[in-house]
Amino acid sequence: MTDMETVLAAARTSSSNWKAAFNRGDAAGCAKAYAVDATMTAEPFGTFFGREAIEGFWQQIIDQGYSDVEYIDPEMTVLDDRTVLLKSGWRMNKAHGVITKELWVLQPDGTALLTEDAFEVQG
């Protein structure tokens, strides 16, 4: 596998794992997909800094009954041998919107973590 294939496969796996964690109501599992110092901007809710704050956001969303997230027409672009940009529409049981920027970065252990996440709730 080339470096580009490796980083793309890692990002796909980590993204799938994030969605599975969310859909089983596991905010801690969602947070594990983020780098410790990640930044997440969730419009209109605000910007969250660090894994702990991001976990708190996802826990609140899960506690409010949101579930069943799926991505609509995701586009993954390999930016370099360590980084993949994901953009996508998304929907779940009580909301929908758009992901404008998920930056998945390859880690030394072969997994990918989110360093930046930006999405909008549109309804």
Image (cartoon, rainbow, N blue to C red):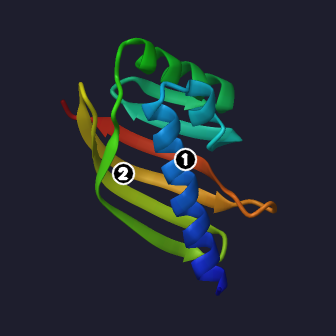
Residue 17 is marked as: 1
Q: Hey, what amino acid is under mark 1?
A: Asn
Q: Residue furthest left?
A: 123
Q: Between disc 1 and disc 2, whose residue precedes?
A: 1
Residue 31, percent across and down? 61, 33
> Gap between marks 1 and 2, in whole Å?
19 Å
**As drawn, 90 above or below 64:** below
At mark 1, the secondary structure is helix
Residue 100 is marked as: 2
Residue 77, percent across and down? 45, 71
**As drawn, 82 above or below 43:** below
Residue 14, percent across and down? 58, 53
At mark 2, the secondary structure is strand
Query: Which quadrant of the rendered structure holds the C terminus?
Result: top left
Q: Hey, what amino acid is under mark 2?
A: Thr
- Residue 75 left/right relative to 48: left
Residue 122, percent across and down? 21, 34
Q: Quadrant of residue 121?
A: top left
Seen at 58% across and 80% down, the residue is 5
